[in-house]
Image (tube, rainbow, N blue to C red):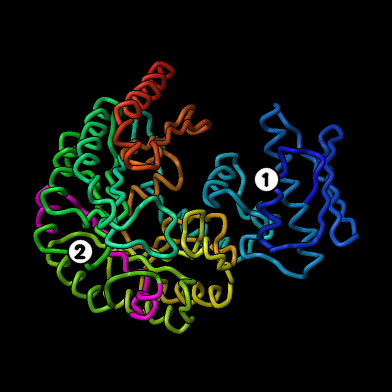
Amino acid sequence: MTTNTAFLYPELMDVVRLFGADTQIAHTFTKEGDVFRNEVTVCGKTYSFAEEQPCADELEHKRYAKRFAKLAVYRALEAATGRSMPWGALTGIRPTKLAYAELAAGRAFAPLFEKFGVCEQNISLVRDVLAAQKGLYAREEGAADLYIGIPFCPSKCNYCSFITADISRTGKFVEAYLAALEREIAACRGLFQTLRSVYIGGGTPFVLQTEQLRQVLRAVQPLLPAGVEYTVEAGRPDVFTPEKLELLRGFGVTRICVNPQSFCDETLRRIGRRHTAADIYRAYETARPFGFDINVDLIAGLTGESTEEFCKSVEQAVALRPENITVHTLCLKKGAQLKEEEHFLAAEGVKEMLAYARKALYAAGYQPYYLYRQKYMAGNFENTGWCKPGKACVYNIDVMEETCDNLACGANAVTKKLFAQGARIERLGAPKDIPTYIAKAGEVAEKKRLLFTEGERMRQ
């Protein structure tokens, strides 16, 4: 693709990827007064578009230039190919954030979504997500969520792009990693006024031995206010034990995640899991008496899984009646084995899988309460979190909507500091490599302190 404006190129390529276009596409952008003009040539045919939009400053100019250019390229490719996408020209943005921005400006969000070619079912989905977030969606000065990353797993799934690796190869780093993590967690004291939630993720936190897990929970304890939402992504059913569950309850954990991804044994084998569907049921039934809210994760589009097999997994998840069910669409990034093997993200069957999941979850009384999208998702679809009424996960809402500071500890963890009510977000990423993180954890903690100290000065 060619364009006369360099800053537009990455945005426009996101649209081109949606169509898998391998033809020559040329784009030209000009601006005359308040009128943004885009010309797109596809297969020798030129399409012209004009949008009038006053801009207050250069930042606004760039935002609208990107928006209208993406829309122009999408419309041209849609006309040239006869195809449309479920989320239209929306790429690189959380749909709900755009909806909230429109509402904050005193406008209904549906007209903009319709203009961008978003299908009616997805506009309705966004509407339902915003309704489910009422009473939980909040911008509170000095509020934060705490994330703690445990980058160890029993084995690495072939779709996974995280830094996690088989603990049989990385186990030698666990002791030093946990010591560094303790120091970084302790350094978070005083960096927030209100803690809305805590989330220990991975990786698979339950792959740690009971005493190692206790070490992490003990480090978090001094930061905990009474009654805070506290989640541990327990993860793989093959590492669940009653002792670990009892430990979590004793430290005030309120929510855990059981992550089967599929209830099909053959799928589990293909993606590199070392457990069966029977293990999922055993883990779930072991955890239920402890009184946690439970989330169950599923992925649509896993290697070789049929629509029928995925739909059966949805039925099995619903039958367990967990408080949350998250339905992901397969997304491959750099570092995933499937991407390295040059498997392509075919959308075959995924549309039907997600449509069935929506229908089944609505029928079972679940409501969608957060959603987000990523690049390289099968079929240009989405990930959606569903919950029973009153059982939404605060951490997921805060992170997806970027309404609070996020204090993130651990290798590859990304801290986010909001300024001017979220108008500007500063990010601080920790080293991805575990040995490098161990060596630099103190430096990361100090940079985090300086970032949050600057925020305090700006508020005063």
First to last magenta residue range? 245-270
All told, the count of numbered labels is 2
Between 91 and 242, the residue placed more toward the observer is 242
Q: Position of residue 102 (x, y in %)?
A: 59, 44
Residue 264 is left or right of residue 198, and the answer is: right
> In the rendered image, which residue does mark 2 sit on?
239
> In the rendered image, which residue does mark 1 sit on?
10
Q: Is residue 274 above or below residue 164?
A: below
Q: Name the kind of residue labelled 2 in the image.
A: Val
Q: In this view, does 420 lie above or below 433?
A: above
**Image quadrant where one finds the C terminus:** top left
- The residues tagged by marks 2 and 1 sit, at their Cα atoms, a distance apart of 42 Å
Give the quarter of the image for residue 368: bottom left
Residue at 47% x, 31% y: name it: 426
Q: Where is residue 30 in the image (x, y as percent from the top left)?
A: 85, 38
Residue 60 is left or right of residue 264, and the answer is: right
Q: Which residue lies furthest to the bottom in this view?
A: 308
10 Å neighbourhood of mark 2: few (<14), some, or many (≥20)? some
Q: Disc number at residue 211?
A: none
Mark closest to the chain's N terminus, 2 or 1: 1
